[in-house]
Amino acid sequence: MSRVHRLEVRVYYEDTDFSGVVYHASYLRFMERGRTELIRALGIEQRELFDGETALGFAVRKMTIDFLRPAVMDDLLTVETACIEARGATMDLEQRVLRGGEALITAAVRVACVGGGRARRIPDGLRKRLMLED
């Protein structure tokens, strides 16, 4: 398993519903930022992956989310992201959204590496940086 990447996210008014509680879809954006920043922390710019004839991207294929507790406006949250396995063109990640030490959201995410409208094997360089082999 790779190391855990942590990203702090502040809850703003735009992230909440009429009652000041974080709207469920906002957690999807927070977790997307966590996955993007994990890749960036490995020294890979996603824009570089998108450019050229061998352009690649990652698409969420499957996500299972447990909503455990609500976050509210002005909370400072931590999004934890860890890659746990890679197989060919897919990568499994675990994500948690925390407030302090309290887990608010847990998620199992499978992303597919895609290019030219088709599944593509995750590049060996990225796999090594994630400390994953298959």
Image (cartoon, rainbow, N blue to C red):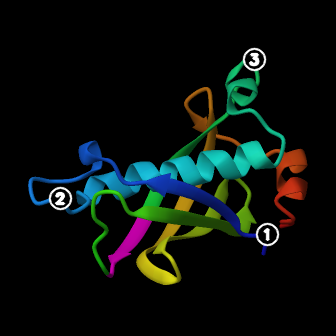
Magenta stretch, residue numbers: 63-68
- The prevailing secondary structure element of the residues shown in magenta is strand
Q: Amino acid at mark 1?
A: Ser
Tag 2 residue: 20
Tag 1 residue: 2
Residue at image coords 69%, 33%: 46
Q: Nearer the viewer, mark 1 or mark 3?
A: 1
Residue at image coords 35%, 57%: 74
Q: Residue furthest front?
A: 74
Q: Amino acid at mark 2?
A: Gly
Residue 114 position within the rendered picture, expressed as x and y whole percent measured from the top left: 62, 38
- What is the CA distance from the residue labelled 1 to the residue labelled 3? 29 Å
Answer with the quarter of the image where residue 24 lies.
bottom left
**Circle 1 residues within 10 Å: few <14, some 14–19, many ≥20:** some
Residue 22 vertical placement versus 100 (above, below): above
- What is the CA distance from the residue labelled 1 to the residue labelled 2? 35 Å
Q: Regarding mark 3 in the picture, which secondary structure is present there?
A: loop
The reply, left or right, for residue 120 in relation to residue 125 is left
Residue at image coords 69%, 52%: 38
Q: Amino acid at mark 3?
A: Glu
Residue 76 position within the rendered picture, expressed as x and y whole percent measured from the top left: 46, 62
